Image: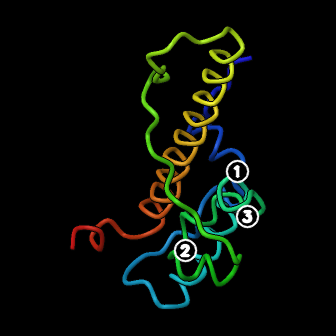
């Protein structure tokens, strides 16, 4: 069975908050805080094995210190496992090769889901706040 990473559209469709309240002019602390809370809820709604798996990808919208204080878990950004598995130089039994392929598929999906979910909150923020403020 092949595991396919979630596409950005699939991730955004599973968000609790599809859009953030549009802000015109300079945002207040309350505006930024409200947007951050919505982004936290969205990131937490994306299933992930990272950080123990109970908090989705909340680690994307909190600092490592905030995340650890809230969840008592740490998250290491998943490394890019490459497009294909790295096989050892020795001969592999078919079962070993299947296990290695499966591990690579899981690592690839975790990496792609993390990367694609990281892009989605940024897109929502860019739509919510004035373009004039984004150039600074």
**Which of 134 and 22 lies nearest the eye of the viewer?**
134
> Which of the image's four quarters has the C terminus?
bottom left
Outermost residue toward the left? 136
Say which residue label 1 marks. Answer: 49
Outermost residue toward the front? 90
Element class at badge 3: loop
Q: Residue 14: percent from the left, percent from the top?
A: 72, 48
What residue lies at 69% left-to-right and 54% top-to-bottom? Answer: 15
Q: CA distance from mark 3 to mark 2?
A: 12 Å
Q: Residues within 10 Å of mark 2 (few under 14, many from 20)?
A: some
Q: Nearer the viewer, mark 3 or mark 1?
A: 1
Say which residue label 3 marks. Answer: 55
Task: Please identify the quarter of the rendering in which residue 13 is found.
Answer: top right
What residue lies at 55% left-to-right and 48% top-to-bottom? Answer: 114
**Which of 91 and 69 lies nearest the eye of the viewer?**
91
Q: Nearer the viewer, mark 1 or mark 2?
A: 1
Q: CA distance from mark 1 to mark 2?
A: 17 Å
Q: CA distance from mark 3 to mark 1?
A: 9 Å
Q: From the viewer's perspective, is residue 74 above or below residue 122?
A: below
Say which residue label 2 marks. Answer: 62
Element class at badge 2: loop
- Left or right of 105? Residue 54 is right
**Which of 3 and 39 lies nearest the eye of the viewer?**
3
What residue lies at 37% left-to-right and 80% top-to-bottom? Answer: 25
């Amino acid at each position: 069975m092949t595991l396919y990473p979630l596409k950005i559209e699939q991730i955004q469709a599973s968000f609790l908050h599809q859009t953030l309240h549009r802000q015109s002019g300079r945002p207040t602390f309350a505006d930024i805080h409200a947007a951050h809370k919505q982004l936290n809820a969205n990131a937490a709604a994306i299933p992930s094995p990272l950080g123990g798996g109970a908090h989705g990808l909340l680690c994307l919208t909190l600092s490592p210190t905030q995340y650890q204080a809230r969840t008592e878990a740490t998250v290491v950004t998943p490394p890019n496992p490459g497009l294909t598995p790295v096989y050892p130089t020795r001969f592999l039994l078919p079962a070993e090769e299947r296990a290695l392929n499966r591990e690579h598929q899981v690592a690839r999906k975790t990496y792609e889901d993390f990367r694609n979910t990281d892009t989605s909150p940024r897109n929502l923020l860019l739509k919510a706040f004035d373009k004039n403020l984004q150039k600074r």
